[in-house]
Image (spheres, rainbow, N blue to C red):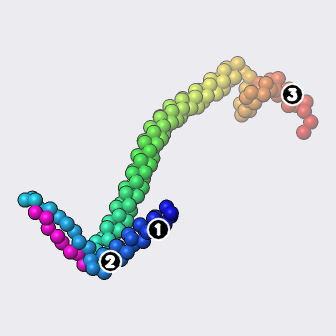
Amino acid sequence: MRSHRAFARTWSVCRNLAESWRTGLTIFAFTKTGAMGRIRVAPPAVLAALLLLAAAALLSGGLIQHAARYTMELARTVRLERATVRLERENVELISRLAAQAEQLSRLVQEVGRLRELEAVIRTISGMESAGEQPLIGTGYGGLEGRALREQLPE
């Protein structure tokens, strides 16, 4: 029994829509003075209004989607810019460290040169080095002992 009533109501609504499509749509409007006005809208105008409404809904959905994508891209760009700034700061810090280490290395190279000169002077003064003979630095075979050992080694 209930399904019959539901079907009858649905059928009635469909019949009314079909009838309004054939005859047009009647809009009742009240003016500021309280008088009621009646406007009849033709079916093509209703169809045009529905198409316009559907287009507006689609466009607004597309605009919302575009705004969301733009917001995400903007957030990504901001993150990348912050990371770039951080990396640039780290690069400047590393460059300054490398410059300090290069300066320290050049001082060490100069110091090693002075120590070699000092070693040569000391060897010359102590008589461990003869003219034209280069000492064997760091081997422990320099001077007279080194010459004696070299003479004993087979060639």
- Given residues 4 and 106, the one toward you in this image is 4
Q: Is residue 112 left or right of residue 100?
A: right
Residue 110 appears in the picture as rendered: no
CA neighbours of label 1 inside 10 A, class few (<14), some (14 to 19), many (20+): few
Residue 94's tag is: none
Vertical side of 66 occupied by 27: above or below = below
Residue holding disc 2: 19
Residue holding disc 1: 7
- Given residues 86 and 56, the one toward you in this image is 56
CA neighbours of label 3 inside 10 A, class few (<14), some (14 to 19), many (20+): few
Give the residue at x 74% y 32%. Answer: 133
Residue 26 appears in the picture as rendered: yes
Farthest top residue? Answer: 126
Q: Are marks 2 and 3 in contact (CB under 8 Å)?
A: no
Q: Is residue 132 left or right of residue 37?
A: right
Residue type indicated by callout 3? Leu
Residue 149's tag is: 3
Q: Which residues are magenta?
A: 35-42
